[in-house]
């Protein structure tokens, strides 16, 4: 999930430079809660799978499923 957040921030920076605010806003919407959720995982208050499931459900609601799926696959290929 840290890598997903990193990738999102890189893409947000790129989208901002290109003036594409629609995708920029959707990425911000998708990831704005993730740092606090990662903290909950570290404290043992939420399981990793639950947070990932919520992230995927939110991506579907805002039309970012393809972006998220692609990044998850890229991360799996790096390993």
Image (tube, rainbow, N blue to C red):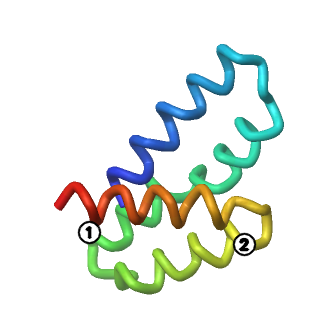
Above or below, 29 against 25 in this view is below
Residue underneath mark 2: 60
Q: Where is residue 35? Give x, y as percent.
A: 44, 53
Identify the mark at residue 26; answer none if there is no mark. Answer: none
First in sequence, mark 1 or 2: give its number. Answer: 1
The residue at 52%/66% (across/down) is 69
Q: Is residue 61 left or right of residue 59?
A: right
Secondary-structure class at tag 1: helix
Above or below, 22 against 41 in this view is above
Residues 37 and 60: in front is 60
Residue underneath mark 1: 42
Secondary-structure class at tag 2: helix
Name the quadrant of the N terminus. bottom left
The residue at 60%/32% (across/down) is 12
Q: In this view, does 33 lie to the left or right of 6?
A: right
Name the quadrant of the C terminus. bottom left
């Amino acid at each position: 999930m840290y890598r997903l957040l990193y990738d999102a921030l890189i893409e947000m920076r790129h989208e901002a430079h290109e003036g594409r605010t629609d995708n920029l806003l959707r990425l911000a919407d998708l990831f704005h809660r993730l740092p606090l959720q990662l903290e909950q995982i570290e404290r043992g208050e939420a399981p990793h799978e639950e947070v990932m499931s919520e992230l995927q459900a939110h991506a579907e609601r805002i039309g970012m499923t393809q972006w998220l799926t692609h990044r998850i696959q890229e991360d799996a290929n790096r390993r």
